[in-house]
Image (cartoon, rainbow, N blue to C red):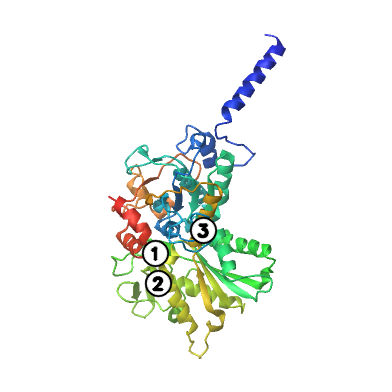
Amino acid sequence: MKSGHLSICLLSLALASVIFLSGCRKIVDKGHTNMAIVDKALYDKTSRFYVNFRAYPQDMKALPIGIFDSGTGGLTVAEKIISLDHFDNITGSDLNNDEILDFAGESFIYLADQANMPYGNYDKEGKSEYLRELAVKDAIFLLGDRYYKNAYEAEPSGIKPRVKILVIACNTATAYGLKTIESMLEQSGSPVKVIGVINAGVKATLDQLNINEDTDPMAIGVLATPGTISSGAYERTINEELAKRKVKESKIAVVSQSGYGFAEAVDCEHDYVNPDLLEARMGYRGPEIGTNDEDIKLDMLKAYNFDYSGNNMLVEKGKDGNFLAFQLNNASNYARFNLVSLVERHRQSGINSPIRAIILGCTHYPFQLETLKQTIEELREYREPDGNFPYKNLLADTITFIDPAVYTAIECYQTLRNDGNLAYRINEQKIEAYISVPSSTLSDDVLTPEGHLTYEFKYGREPGTEDVSTKQVPFSHTNIDTNNMERVKTLLPYSYALIAPTMK
């Protein structure tokens, strides 16, 4: 064949390819430097983590809303989304209430990555890249169409719908995984968008405090997991938002406290709380008596005002009166310890601006909101032996606790409406809820007596492998802690009403 004819043929083939592919979703390579898990999701068809974005439904309205968290705490976000009544469902205007749920007729898929929690400890253990990979894997599960029916399946045989939007209901996963997931979706050419709780929470805080150029100096508290705090995500996002509002950073002091063991206690992780115990035990990983940042300070015991009733504290003293063991054993005591530590940190900073808002930078913390409010009131009246009130002037007359969940729900609605992806159905809402559990293929030496991953195994894993140490299975009475479901039933009635009937 002559070269001219060959050129024409090649050009024709190229044009035909363009026409053929124009109706398909395209994987866009923009020169990103990816994590291995992202490359697997985008390009490696042999990988168990591959997501066939080209097969994604063109019309996404009927697809569910995907929500994930490191545990059941993210159901606080799901609850705000499911129950949101903030907009006029016809016009989309901000009415606050038209007595029709904004997400009426929508379906949801929720993933609790319970087996791999707490996310907040990965950075502390030098495993921030593995944490980032976990967040991407959570997204991949929601974007995919398979699930494991049980921990014994070699390959997932369950069929589930893909999702039309990703909501990261975990502050730590947002801090470490949001940008990577955004990049993956951008490269995939997918119209699916992802939103996280941090930006929504920060914007809401500054809006509620009406912060502008003329604002008087104040302090904002951030209570979050160690991983979220060490990422600096909240402080960085607050400063970025202040710059947009032309407010000097020096006017707003940000005081942060790593919530040691708080989220884990709410989720009844036995390394942190165990309601069946009556005395101190080995293997406890919560705060103990000491002088380090994460320790309980002896001279602060009166300020903490712990609840010693029942087995809420596991305390053991020697004959000399010194503590042999001092262990928190319920979520309320963890809430007290971390909030008092936050306010004491502000006092130690020497900054006199009063705290006017506290961001609950973990989806588990709103479960203890009443305890947190009560603790603030106790600190106002706390008096030292010399008659001094050390905290009274550091606490504004009114302190706003910011739960980013409701503002994340609002952003979710606005994003779907602007993209034309709301379902607009009259059906009842429904939810499919999944939880990660240890794989049945794991050896006993990496499991606790209760069947959970050991701490050493959990935080000793490396990113970039095809290993499956945990599997996503439907919520059931065998894999959800009874105390957790009772708390969900009491505090999250919309979520409970949708989830409970589906559990076996």
Where residue 367 appears, as percent x and y from the top left, is: 41, 66
Mark closer to the observer (2, 3): 3
Residue that label 1 marks: 265
Q: Is residue 130 left or right of residue 115?
A: right
Q: Nearer the viewer, mark 1 or mark 3?
A: 3
Mark number displayed over residue 22: none
Q: Quadrant of residue 9?
A: top right
Say whether marks 1 and 3 touch (CB < 8 Å): no
Residue 26 vertical position relative to residue 458 in the rendered view, above or below: above
Query: At numbered mark 1, what does the secondary structure look like: helix, strand or loop?
Result: helix
> Looking at the image, can residue 177 be seen?
no
x, y percent for residue 54: 52, 34
Asked if disc 2 and disc 1 are in contact, CB closer than 8 Å, the reply is yes
Density class for disc 3 (Cα within 10 Å; few <14, some 14-19, many ≥20) is: some
Whole-percent x, y for residue 144 in the image: 45, 40
Question: Residue shown at 41%/73% (left/top)?
Answer: 371
Q: Amino acid at mark 2?
A: Asn
The correct choice, above or below, for 14 with respect to 4 in the image is below
Choose between 392 and 1: the one closer to the eye: 1
Can residue 471 be seen in this snapshot? yes
Q: Seen in the image, is 503 located left or right of residue 323?
A: left
Q: Earlier in the sequence, mark 2 or mark 3?
A: 2
Dot placed on the residue nearer the N-terminal end, 2 or 1: 1
Kindly identify which residue carries mark 2: 333
Residue kind at label 1, given as amino acid type: Ala
Residue denoted by label 3: 410
- Spot the residue most to the front: 90
Mark 1–mark 3 distance (CA, rounded to whole Å): 29 Å
Q: Give the secondary structure at mark 2.
A: helix
Q: 10 Å neighbourhood of mark 2: few (<14), some, or many (≥20)?
A: many
